[in-house]
């Protein structure tokens, strides 16, 4: 019954032509162009880019901070200190201080700062130099230079070797300028003497 049925003949297999890379003929096209550099791939860890156009004097750390960048001790605006505040080199105060700030370094009173002398004391600031931009209530004794910015509000006496007051600053108090005034203000007061009730003997009172 199926004698007349013919099986389809299989298709002949065709081998793909081999792909050959064309050769570059320098005699015809000139020197071969340089291959583009591949971008470095970072799979993990830390990557430190090099400066473009030569070396740089400023080096960076793993956290991105500059090694030779100036740093300041900062008292933020949301911090309140009561008592004596001491520092060594420099300090930026932008918060509130009730008491006395003392140091041989440089004090910067920020625009948001409010500094007032403690109850029973007159001195609020006693430093090497001071830059006042905020509010200060109390005396300021500076051995070098004090500067009142245009936003400063100072109620108290100032004793300094040099002083600079910008236009717009509010200053209510007395001012004594000169090296001799600073020496007199920072001199240790002589001990007081009081007679005893029993006779002429005296006692030293601190």
Image (cartoon, helix red, strand yellow):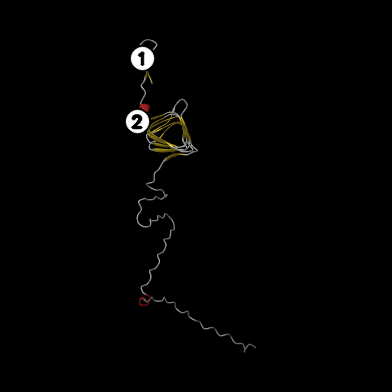
Residue 16's x, y, as percent?
Answer: 47, 79
Asked if residue 2 lies left or right of residue 124, the reply is right
**Residue 202 numbered tag:** 1
Q: Provide residue 30's location: percent of width, then percent of height.
A: 36, 74
Q: Quadrant of the C terminus?
A: top left
Q: Residue furthest right?
A: 1
Q: Which residue is mark 2?
A: 179
Identify which residue, 109 or 178, lies in the foreground: 178
Q: Position of residue 180 (x, y in %)?
A: 34, 28
Q: Secondary structure at mark 2?
A: helix
Quadrant in the picture for residue 179: top left
Q: CA distance from mark 2 to mark 1?
A: 35 Å
Q: Does residue 14 appear to the left or right of 22 in the view shown?
A: right
Label count reads: 2
Q: Which is in the foreground here, disc 2 or disc 1?
A: 2
Mark 1 or mark 2, which is nearer the start of the sequence? 2
Q: Residue furthest toward the front? A: 167
Mark 2 neighbour density, 10 Å: few (under 14) some (14–19) many (20 or more): some
Closer-to-camera residue (117/205): 117
Quadrant of the rendering where the N terminus is positioned: bottom right
Pointer 2 with pointer 1, Cβ within 8 A: no
Mark 1 neighbour class, 10 Å CA radius: few under 14, some 14 to 19, many 20 or more: few
Label 1: which secondary element: strand
Q: Is residue 187 above or below residue 200?
A: below
Tell me if I can see residue 184 in this picture.
Answer: yes
For residue 5, above or below residue 186: below
Label annotation for residue 30: none
For the point 44% across and 39% down, the residue is 74
Q: Is residue 97 visible?
A: no
x%, y% of residue 51? 38, 55
Q: Residue furthest bottom?
A: 4
């Amino acid at each position: 019954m199926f004698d007349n049925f013919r099986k389809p003949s299989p298709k002949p297999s065709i081998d793909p032509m081999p792909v050959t890379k064309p050769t570059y003929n320098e005699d015809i096209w000139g020197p071969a162009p340089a291959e583009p550099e591949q971008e470095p791939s970072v799979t993990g860890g830390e990557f430190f880019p090099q400066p473009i156009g030569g070396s740089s004097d400023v080096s960076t750390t793993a956290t991105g901070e500059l090694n030779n960048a100036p740093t300041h001790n900062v008292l933020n605006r949301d911090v309140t200190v009561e008592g004596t505040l001491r520092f060594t080199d420099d300090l930026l105060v932008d918060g509130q201080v009730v008491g006395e700030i003392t140091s041989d370094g440089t004090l910067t009173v920020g625009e948001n700062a409010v500094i007032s002398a403690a109850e029973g004391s007159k001195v609020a600031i006693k430093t090497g130099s001071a830059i006042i931009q905020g509010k200060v209530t109390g005396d300021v004794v500076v051995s070098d230079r004090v500067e009142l910015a245009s936003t400063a509000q100072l109620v108290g006496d100032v004793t300094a070797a040099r002083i600079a007051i910008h236009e717009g600053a509010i200053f209510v108090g007395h001012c004594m300028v000169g090296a001799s005034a600073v020496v007199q203000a920072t001199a240790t007061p002589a001990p007081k003497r009081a007679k005893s009730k029993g006779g002429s003997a005296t006692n030293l009172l601190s």
